Amino acid sequence: MKKKLSIISLILIFSVLVFITFAKFSNPICIDGVSISIKEDGKNDVVFHIYNKGLKSVTIEEFTLNNKNHPKGLALGISYDTQQLVQSGTNNPLIKFMKIDSELIEPRLTNQEMKEAIKRKEMTPIHYGIRVEYDEEPIESMTIKYQYFGFAVTKKYSLERWNLGTN
């Protein structure tokens, strides 16, 4: 009986460790593009197009650029019931910007699920983006701290391939 209990305990401990490792080392937040618009004051609004390839919703807690404090104009953008990507300056009422931690980032819908959601017109989140304002040095990296399966995870992304320099 003790041997059976020990084996069950070891299996349970191993399963918990595998789950924690999965949650900590998986990378559900993906960046698949960027859009830049120039505001009237000459500053740039940059929107990083993101999606959640994970199994569960993600809550962003912190966001930094180039290992510094929070950038100006930081906001989470969500497009509802539209195929339009999240962008600044479109005046599309179906694209809303809010505090970075105010909404969950749901797992990405399949193309069929997107089409059905857009037809239903129930304000279903379709696309996500993170908007920042910058007018300083080039953007080389971003760090996102988020909650995934109840664990705090911090990931750093290199942005050098997008060459996001100042004007």
Image: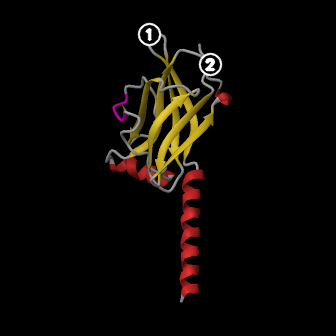
Query: What amino acid does circle 2 point to?
Result: Gly
Instruction: Tell me, for residue 165, which label it has, or none.
Output: 2
- In front here: 123 or 15? 15
- The prevailing secondary structure element of the residues shown in magenta is loop
What x and y, as percent, mark residue 43? 49, 14
- The residue that appears at 39% across and 38% down in the rendered structure is 101
Q: Secondary structure at mark 1?
A: loop
With respect to residue 25, does 92 lie above or below? Answer: above
Residue 85 seen from this side: no
- Mark 1: give few (<14), some (14-19) or many (20+) Cα within 10 Å: few
Instruction: Tell me, for residue 116, which label it has, or none.
Output: none
Query: Going by the picture, which residue comes out furthest to the right?
Result: 161
With respect to residue 104, does 3 lie above or below? Answer: below
With respect to residue 5, does 47 lie above or below? Answer: above
Instruction: Tell me, for residue 41, which label it has, or none.
Output: 1
Residue 15 seen from this side: yes
Query: Going by the picture, which residue comes out furthest to the top?
Result: 41
Residue 115 vs residue 15: left or right? Answer: left
Query: Going by the picture, which residue comes out furthest to the bottom?
Result: 1
Q: Which residues are magenta?
A: 92-96
